[in-house]
Amino acid sequence: MTDPLRPSLALPEGSSKVLMHSCCAPCSGEVMEAMLASGINYSIFFYNPNIHPVKEYEIRKNENIRFAEANGIEFIDADYDVDNWFERVKGLENSPERGERCTKCFDMRFERTALYAHEHGFDTITSSLGISRWKDMNQINGCGERAAGRYDDLTYWTYNWRKHGGSARMIEISKREEFYQQEYCGCVYSLRDTNRHRRSQGRERITLGVKFYGRDSVIEEIRRPVIGSTEPVENSPAAPSKDSGQ
């Protein structure tokens, strides 16, 4: 898809090959098309052990694979080491979104991305995580730069994918491709808190695997705000129970 408003992207100086950490198809669709339009050499790295339950994980991953294959982009399917994720965020089960638990989660995912990039000849990493207006760009960039900083030959690309119409194109692409529309960030605690918030408003709890962009009369962005996260942000700081709250 060509868009006269989409700028031609320039990689950081000295960069030539990008490993893009992808969290899901809706967030990565615009990032993928933007890099394709600019002729950037990149591969997708799917490492998201935070996503719960496994049914949701498989749906999100397979949607991403479908779009990658349609565009001829290499898709690297990393481990679903969920036990390590729970150990990493232990003690932070009640941390609000954009808080310390999310930092730990981003750190873990970016560290694995950076390691793979270092071992397989990529000089740059970036992520689709920051395109959602519900995420804190500074928090994500900080985690990415910290992970890349472990290796002298690696750079984290901090490009703001929301700008120049990126956020709007994210929704347009999601509708065009009829991507699966997740209704919570991904982890068991996000699912729990989102369901609590919905119940407080008299709404039904989330049903997995039923909503798709372009097939419903009301299109919502990736997820709705939850307790402790009532407004989208541009740049603000921000033994585990496996009860999903469903």
Image: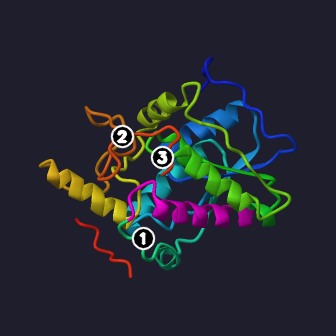
Find the distance from the CA under tag 1 to the CA under tag 2.
22 Å
For discs 2 and 3, the disc positioned in front in the rendered view: 2
The percent position of residue 40, horizontal first and vertical second, equals: 75, 39
Three-letter code, disc 1 = Leu
Find the distance from the CA under tag 2 to the CA under tag 3.
10 Å
- Could you tell which of marks 2 and 3 lies nearer the N-terminus? 3
Give the residue pinned by disc 3: 135
- Please, what secondary structure does the residue beneath circle 2 have? loop
Q: Can residue 128 be seen in this view?
A: no
In the rendering, which numbered label is found on residue 92?
1
User: Residue pushed farthest left?
Assistant: 202
Say if 157 sits above or below 215 in the image: below
Magenta-drawn segment: 95-116
Three-letter code, disc 3 = Lys
- Could you tell which of marks 3 and 1 lies nearer the N-terminus? 1
The percent position of residue 10, horizontal first and vertical second, equals: 77, 33
- Mark 2 touching mark 3, by CB under 8 A? no
User: Residue pushed farthest bottom?
Assistant: 239
Viewer-side residue, 49 vs 133: 133
